Image (tube, grey):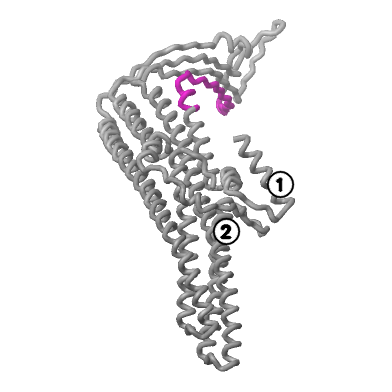
Amino acid sequence: MKRSVITALILTFTITMNGQKKWTLKDCIDYAMQNNITLQQSRLQKQSATEDRKQSHAALFPSLSASTNQSVGYRPWLSSGMTTVTNGTVNTKVNKTYYNGTYGINASWTVWNGNQNRNQVKLNEVSEEQAELNIAETANSIQEKIAQLYVQILYMNEAIKVSKESLETSKKNEARGKEIMEVGRMSKADLAQLTAQRATDEYNIVEAESNLANYILQLKQLLEITSEEPFDIEIPAYSDEQALAEIPSLGSVYEHALTYRPEIRSSELSLKSSDLQMKIAKAGHLPTISMTSGVATNTGSMSSNEWGHQMKTNLDASLGASVSIPIFDNRKTKTAINKAKIQHEQALLDIQDKQKQLYSTIEGYWLDANTNQQKFKAAQSTVASEQASFDLLTEQFNVGLKNIVELLMGKDKLLNAQQNRLQSKYMTILNQQLLRFYRGEDMNL
């Protein structure tokens, strides 16, 4: 935790000093782990669960309280009062206003209530652990979203480069078309098609840059960065070999995830929680034994004794025990037991559902990794083939052996092949990393 805080502070300082800071995936994750609002809310929920656990521990001990009451009274028709003799003189004093004070210290202790209090401690400990797992689950979800957005940004950067290369080719074709039209070998209609192709490429670049800006905005929102300072990510160089690396097996990833993923552990704790709630509910049929004790005294102005003497002579101490035996509670205990049984069954179903969801998620990543890897292999040869074909078409077009339609079709095929190659490459790398992440490795592209 301390290391993450230091990392976040360093990143903040770096951004302040240099607006052109390049963010790596690890930088993004470290920063989000400290600043994401959803994650901070999960941490506050865990703190609340910790307080509940501490309170239930404290409830095992006796409680102690002190009390006092001070009152003033008035008797308007009082005719007799206090008589005193001083130096042979009899003095009678009538006080219609009087004062009383009481003082007490009381203690109470639930000795036994069917172990409800002790089981409540265990239940709150389970809730605290679940809250901790909820933090981990939220953190994992954020890391996955960051990785997905990060890879999309990488892909869009590469896609924009390809689109710009395609635009340069379109500009050259348009310029060449003007030259050919001037010598009478091309019609204005054909030149208009070349111009339209150049305009389309320009539009594609604008659209791709808009998508890139949207992905960057989503990433900044996850990181809770609201400033208008420039934000850019580090563009690592990914080789084709990385996309062709061995994909982790579906079975090994799933088996490890069953013992590691917080959502599965949280579901198992829900089952433990339902068992504890069952014990607490059944304790409603059992007696409750309590002990009480107290020390009290009182004083009053109507007494002839001094305040200190009254405090002493009126002192009263007590010690008692009580037993409460439930006989009929309007079906409250039975209802609580039945609800605990229902919750137990729900917890069992929840475990199965979470395991099913986990397998479905991992299987989806595994299928995407394999599919995109195969697409990437095919796209590599397709790009080479389409590039050679387009180069030949360009040469033939320049000497008048191919028409404008064939040239444009060849260019579209090459562009599609290049885009497909990039997309399959980055999607393969992303899904490979997600599989390793579910296997317990750190997220690090």
Q: Quadrant of residue 30?
A: top right
Residue 55 colored magenta?
yes
Query: Which amino acid, by three-letter code, is at mark 1?
Result: Phe
Element on which disc 1 rests: helix
Distance between mark 1 and mark 2 Cα atoms: 21 Å
What residue did someone put label 1 on?
A: 13
Disc 2 crowd rating (10 Å Cα; few below 14, some 14-19, many 20+) is some
Q: Quadrant of residue 8?
A: top right
Q: What residue do we see at 45% from left, 62% from top?
A: 381
Q: Which residues are magenta?
A: 54-77
What residue did someone put label 2 on?
A: 216
Q: What residue do we see at 41% from left, 43% from top?
A: 248
Residue 130 coordinates in the image, percent (x, y): 43, 35
Disc 1 crowd rating (10 Å Cα; few below 14, some 14-19, many 20+) is few
Query: Which amino acid, by three-letter code, is at mark 2?
Result: Ile
Q: What residue do we see at 54% from left, 91% from top?
A: 185
Residue at the bottom extreme, as displayed:
184
Nearer-the-camera pick, 334 or 366: 366
- In this figure, what is the number of numbered marks? 2
Question: On screen, 47 above or below 245?
Answer: above
